[in-house]
Image: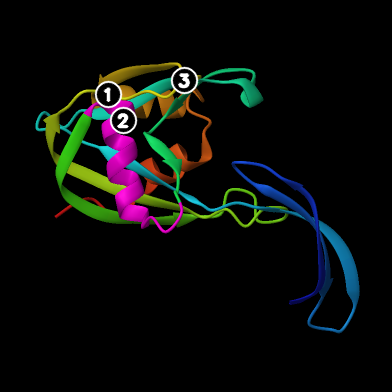
Amino acid sequence: MTTAKRRCLHHGRALTLNAETVIYPDGRQEELEIVRHPGGAAAVAVDDEARICLIRQYRYAADGWLWEIPAGRLEHDESPLACARRELAEEAGVTAADWRPLGQLLPSPGVCDERIHLFLARGLQRVATAHETGEYIEIHWLAPARVQAMLCAGEIVDAKTLVALQNLQSCPPV
């Protein structure tokens, strides 16, 4: 699919909304509203006791509190790993010596080009958090059985967190 025409409808600090005329593989054209997003990175932090860091964060757009892994938006020219390192320190108050990719996901590919890079972080050391203004975050270190129970009970609904935890179970660390 190629883009024949692009018109910016809104340019904000976190995303851009475009009206884009696209040409499909069969030659048909259609105008779509597409959200352009720089992408992000997230980390599943596992401590020496095998506890998993989940944050409970207030999300206005989701109308309440969500269980999530630490994550954030890529800054200009920032690598996904650098973003995951930064967000883990800022949100969870830890740094990690060992990092392993856990895959990627496209949260809403029908309307948005956002790509989230997932990582496993181990070999943790505590540092000071640096929550941003407007971030309301509780940090929790939970046993894997508790996280599994939360998953089964439907308490965790955040897509990046679900995918990262599933990938962690499917591809356990060596």
Mark before the other along the chain sequence, 2 or 1? 2
Is 88 contained in the magenta span? Answer: yes
Could you tell me how far apart the alpha carbons at marks 3 and 1 are, in whole angstroms?
12 Å
Based on the displayed image, in which of its 4 quarters is residue 106 positioned?
bottom right
Residue drawn 83% across the image and 59% down it: 32
- The count of marks equals 3
The residue wearing badge 3 is 133
What's drawn in magenta, residue-wise? 76-93
**Residue 129, labelled with which disc?**
1
155 left or right, relative to 61: left
Could you tell me how far apart the alpha carbons at marks 3 and 2 are, in whole angstroms?
12 Å
Query: Would you say residue 157 is visible in this rendering?
Result: yes
User: Marks 1 and 2: in contact by CB < 8 Å?
Assistant: yes
The residue wearing badge 2 is 90
Mark 3 crowdedness (10 Å alpha carbons): few <14, some 14-19, many ≥20: few
What's the amino acid at mark 2? Glu
Quarter of the picture containing the C terminus is bottom left
162 left or right, relative to 47: right
Q: Main secondary structure of the magenta part?
A: helix
Q: Nearer the viewer, mark 3 or mark 2?
A: 3
What's the amino acid at mark 1? Thr
